[in-house]
Image (cartoon, rainbow, N blue to C red):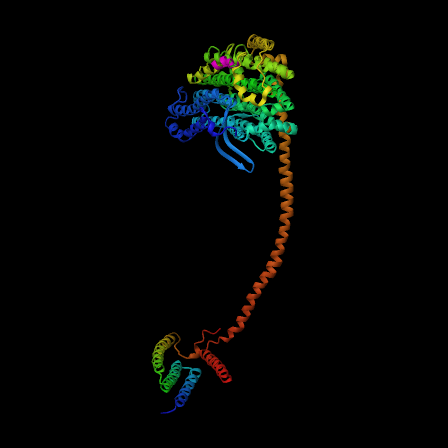
Amino acid sequence: MLPVIYYIGLSAVLFTIGALGVLIRHNPIVIFMSVELMLNSANLAFVAYARAFGELSGQIFVFFVMTVAAAEVAVGLALIVAIFRSKHSIDIDQMNTLKG
Amino acid sequence: MSTSAMSISGLFYLVPWVVFFPIIGLLINIILGAFVGRTVMYPSPLSDIPPLGEKAIGVVASLASGLAFVVSALLAVSLTGHPEGVTVPLLEWIKIGSLQVDWAFRVDTLSVTMMLVVSGVGTLIHIYAIGYMHADVRHNGDPGRFRRFFVFMNLFIAAMMILVTGDNYLVLFVGWEGVGLCSYLLIGFWYEKGSGVRTGDGLGNALAAKKAFVANRVGDFGFLIAMFLMFWAFGSLQFEAVFEKAPELAAAQPGMILAITLFMLVGVTGKSAQIPLYVWLPDAMAGPTPVSALIHAATMVTAGVYLVARSSVLYSLVPQAQNIVALAGGLTALFAATIAVAQFDIKKVLAYSTISQLGFMVAAVGMGAFVAGMFHLVMHAFFKALLFLSAGSVIQGVEQGLHHVEHEVGLKKKLKNEGVYMTDHHDVRIAFDPQDMRNMGGLRTRMKTTFAVYLVGALALAGIFPLAGFWSKDEILAESLVLHPAVYWMLTIAAFLTAFYMGRQVLMVFFGRPRTEPAAHAKENSPVMTVPLIVLAVLSVSGGALNLPGVHTFTTWLEHTLVQHTLEHVQEGEFNITVALISTGLALTALFFAWMFYSLRYHELQKLPFAKRPDDPLRGILGPLFSLLENKYKIDELYKFLILDPYVAFSRFLAQVIDWSFWHDWFHDVLIARSFKVLAKGLAVQVDLGLIDGLANGLASASQALAASMRRLQTGFVRNYALAMFLGLIVIFGFLIMRMIAS
């Protein structure tokens, strides 16, 4: 069995890619995908540690995370559709009405 | 308390009812009178028979007073068995430290005498008033006040009973003030009427009531001081306790007893209308005539005499005080009698006569002739009540004549042609004065009963043998000759004048020919008014039998109360034949003079035309002196000049200079208001606008500046926020990891 550090390393790499994607990309759909990437990296870490420590709670948490991710995507996509309807664009930098 | 409740025997326990019955009567009239009265209140204005409602009210009130009389009579019967008297305690009233005042009833021969007079004469006057007030409320145009009158009358009886039954000076004072209040209420009974000299029409009665109240207040002030001193000196206000300690104190501090008695005298001069406080009594005639009879002749004004008699122990200890009281009484008797000679208002003559007769009583009790004073008090109650009620009957007879004339012929034309003495009121009906004796004459044949009883009363007052006034006045004169010769002469002259002015009055009112149309059409009043008059006339004739020389029933009766305290001071009512002959001779002479002037001479004068003839035969003879007497020696004007005007000027000075100019304009406006304004301005501009607002505004603009600089952080770009979050997370995690490593 592979040592747990490999899984964690992969998880960290995935998280970093996701985080950078969130920070860098302009397209909100891509940002969502990056967020999914970060969530899944967290899932991977949960599963890996659950297996390593023989604990089931980590694996159960993964289901919660996946449920929340699905809900989040549903809400997020609905928001993007609504924004597109009013702005005819989904460029993230054009949504700056909260500017002080 | 000398007598405890255990030893009360006979019917003495009934004594509180002399106060309770009148109170019950007035309560019934207050509560039920409205229902009874309203049903049959306004029948025809000229009907002679009182309607049922009025009758019920009058009967209740008379019955209340009558029951009080029955109780008094029962007490008198009980007293014959226990002449030393008892004290019946009812309630504990005040208990502060060493001061204990109870509402206790003193039943002795003195108080029972007063109770009998008050309730007896009071009941007769109540009955008379049923008829009198029936006409009076209609004449004055407010039948609704009938009930109020009887409520006040019963209240008066109750207050007077408290006064005479009280076992200590404070309870006596409660009654003293109570009767003063009733006097005020009843003088001002028609408060919106009456013509005042100063105010014109419409306030005279209210002013008269106020005058009476204020004059009495001055007297009450003296009485209060006397009570304070008494409490200071004796530690008690209870009669027996005070009298017991009095001789001791008189030996130790004679000045104190003198002060007490003299201050008490001030109260007496107020209530009993003596010099110098008598001025209110003539004006008090503004009240309805039954009030003048009951309160201002028969009972209330004798309260001062009762007070001196009750305090006989104290007065006997200080001859100086006795001397002053006797002189005050004698002077008043003489002084008022001279004024009475020149009055034209039928009630004013009687008012000054009352003052004069009260002077007789005060002089008597002042000299130490307590029995003689009390005897004259009782007799005077009979014949003066009789005279006042008859005068009321005369007035209403003339008023009826006025109504008659008014309906028969044009009143104004008739009266103008007649030559009638009128006030300058624009309404002739009011301007005609039914009380002016110059407007009367010849009533003898028109009001026979009234004439007969009036004659009895006048002769009794004049002191003609064998009527009541002869015996009582003669007793006073006989004793004064022994005790105080100076006063004897004053009283003798006063007695002469008394006979003269009564003769003048009777001749002017009842004899000759009627001088005006209303007098010519005067009518006799209903029996409800004349029967009490007849009863009083019988009493005025036979009253003297109470204390005939040689028998001395009344002296023996009062000795039980007065002697046990005063020992040798109560004088035997010596009958002095010389004195009796002198006074009778003087009275007859006076009546002869009166007949000469007011029958013969007056008749001649009537033949002259109205504009030329003098209104009084004496006016030509006495000249300016007559005007002086007619104007009451201008005492009212003197008081106005000496007391009232300086007082008003002083009040005005206080109001305008002290209060307005100094206090308001300077102190408040200048000192307080202006300095406050300066202070307020300083606070407002410097402190509030400068400091407080500066702080608040500075705080606001500082936070605004801070916010303006901070808002630049909000770029609105989502990725900036995300980056900030990541950086923040990295910082936090970095910190946590560093700490972990460090530990």
For image coordinates 56% across by 66% down, the residue present is B699
Give the number of marks: 0
Residue bounds of the magenta highlight: B538-547
Q: Nearer the viewer, residue B45 or B545?
A: B545
- Residue B242 vs residue B82: left or right? right
Above or below B487: residue B239: below
Q: Main secondary structure of the magenta part?
A: helix
- Residue B549 vs residue B129: left or right? right
Q: Nearer the viewer, residue B394 or B694?
A: B394
- Residue B659 vs residue B709: left or right? right
Is residue B253 among what the camera can see? no
**B540 drawn magenta:** yes
- Residue A28 vs residue B86: left or right? left
For image coordinates 43% across by 76% down, the residue present is A95
Residue B471 x, y percent position in the rendering: 54, 13
Is residue A3 among what the camera can see? yes
Residue B404 x, y percent position in the rendering: 44, 17
Above or below B431: residue B723: below
User: What is the quadrant of residue B615 in the picture?
Assistant: top right
Q: Nearer the viewer, residue B511 or B108?
A: B108
User: What is the quadrant of residue B589 in the picture?
Assistant: top right
Residue B143 x, y percent position in the rendering: 43, 26
